[in-house]
Image (cartoon, rainbow, N blue to C red):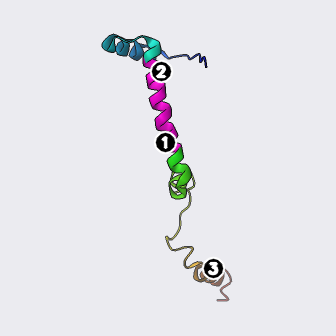
Amino acid sequence: MDITIHLEKEQADKLKYIQQQTKQDASTVLNRSLAEAIDAYYQQIRASHHDPLARLRQSKFIGCFKGEPDLATNSKENFKAIINEKYDPR
């Protein structure tokens, strides 16, 4: 598979530095780096896919509401309190 990439100047400079330090050509450096990045990303996705809690923690859902931590546990009592407060005959 052939892939064409565009590197920003900062990444191109880093690639040149790596080539100088390792005496490897750009293709070797990029192939190795890309393989490592794909493996790490693959593991991250696999781990979160099989762990529903991890998927939930990575979502934007966590932390988007404010409320009591026992809201679901005490939902009936909370509902009654809201209704009583709203329709209090006093």
Q: Which callout, 2 or 3, points to the residue nearer the camera?
A: 2
Query: Residue 70 appears at what percent x and percent y?
Result: 51, 74
Question: Image check: 84 left or right of 23?
Answer: right
Residue 43 is labelled as 1
Region of the chain picked out in magenta, as a range: 29-45
Q: What is the spatial separation of the Cα atoms under label 1 and label 3, in whole angstroms? A: 43 Å
The residue sitting at the bottom extreme is 90
Residue 32 lies in the magenta stretch: yes
How many labels sit on residues?
A: 3
Q: Residues within 10 Å of mark 3 (few under 14, many from 20)?
A: few
Quarter in which the C terminus is drawn: bottom right
Which quadrant is the N terminus positioned in?
top right
The amino acid on which the numbered mark 2 sits, given as a three-letter code, is Asn
Instruction: Using the numbered discs, state the Cα–Cα distance from disc 2 to disc 3 in whole angstroms.
Output: 58 Å
Please provide percent x and percent y for residue 23: 34, 10
Name the residue rendered at 59%, 16% in the picture: 4
Q: Secondary structure at mark 3?
A: helix
Upstream in the sequence, badge 1 or badge 3? 1
Residue named by callout 3: 79
Determine the residue positioned at 50% across, 32% down: 38
- SS for tag 1? helix
Label 1, residues with CA under 10 Å away: few <14, some 14-19, many ≥20: few
Amino acid type indicated by mark 1: Gln
> Is there CB contact under 8 Å for labels 1 and 2?
no
Looking at the rendered structure, the kind of residue marked 3 is Phe
Q: Give the Cα distance between marks 1 and 2.
A: 18 Å
**In the rendered image, is residue 29 in sight?**
yes
> Which residue is nearer to you in this view: 87 or 15?
15
